[in-house]
């Protein structure tokens, strides 16, 4: 068994294509050259630091939920004139989900698995009282694109298989 260089999943060494992402698997010479090229670009600690900041910010999302619940129980008007005690329960549930997604994204960034998941986690982690920390973590993850197995550009760049010369621009958008 070996790992696919594109998606990182385990595949049979005798395979010519990854059964998960469809990438053609390089021969032994190409594999050594590709790993050497990835190592030559150099790894920094940006994804790890960004992931840690995203996780810390996600913890602050949970702290935000606890502060709102405490505000409700105490019936005090200390913070924001009682504004946060009026938040509905469904909104607090969404904040908890955002915190969980933020932690998953931070862990993905720390492992350099998926930049897209790290960015989504960074966005969702910025909805708590520590939102600025999440934004800094998000910026660090976005800046370290070349260090991820699955970078955001994998989802946003056009495929080489599409012939862009066949696109024409009519009055209201692109048409093929």
Image (spheres, rainbow, N blue to C red):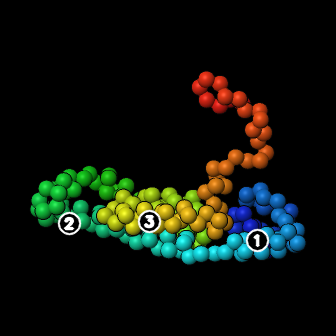
* Residue 147 seen in render: yes
Quadrant into which the C terminus falls: top right
Q: Residue at x 23, y 63 (%)?
A: 69
- The residues bearing labels 3 and 2 have C-alpha atoms spaced at a distance of 28 Å
Q: Is residue 44 above or below residue 76?
A: below
Tell me where residue 93 appears, x and y as whole percent: 35, 57
Q: Which residue is mark 2?
A: 70
Residue farthest to the top, as pictured: 171
Is tag 3's residue or tag 1's residue first in the polypeptide sequence? 1
Element assignment for label 1 = helix
Q: Earlier in the sequence, mark 3 or mark 2?
A: 2
Alpha-carbon distance for marks 3 and 1? 29 Å
Residue topped by disc 1 = 37
Residue 136 tag number: 3
Residue 112 in which image quadrant: bottom right
| SS label for mark 2 | helix
Which residue sits at x=39%, y=67%?
Answer: 133
Write the residue at 28% across / 54% down: 89
Of the two numbered discs 3 and 2 in the rendering, the one whose residue sits closer to the viewer: 3
């Amino acid at each position: 068994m070996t790992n696919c260089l594109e998606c990182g999943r385990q595949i049979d060494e005798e395979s010519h294509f990854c059964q998960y992402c469809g990438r053609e698997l390089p021969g032994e010479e190409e594999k050594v050259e590709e790993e050497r090229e990835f190592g030559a670009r150099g790894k920094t600690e940006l994804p790890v630091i960004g992931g840690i900041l995203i996780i810390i910010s996600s913890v602050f999302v949970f702290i935000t939920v606890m502060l709102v619940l405490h505000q409700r129980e105490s019936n005090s008007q200390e913070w924001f004139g009682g504004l946060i005690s009026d938040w509905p329960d469904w909104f607090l549930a969404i904040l908890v989900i955002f915190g969980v997604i933020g932690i998953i994204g931070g862990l993905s960034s720390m492992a350099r698995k998926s930049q897209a998941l790290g960015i989504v986690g960074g966005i969702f982690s910025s909805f708590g009282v520590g939102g600025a920390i999440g934004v800094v973590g998000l910026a660090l993850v976005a800046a370290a694109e070349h260090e991820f197995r699955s970078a955001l550009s994998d989802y946003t760049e056009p495929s080489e298989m599409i012939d862009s010369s066949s696109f024409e621009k009519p009055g209201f958008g692109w048409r093929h």
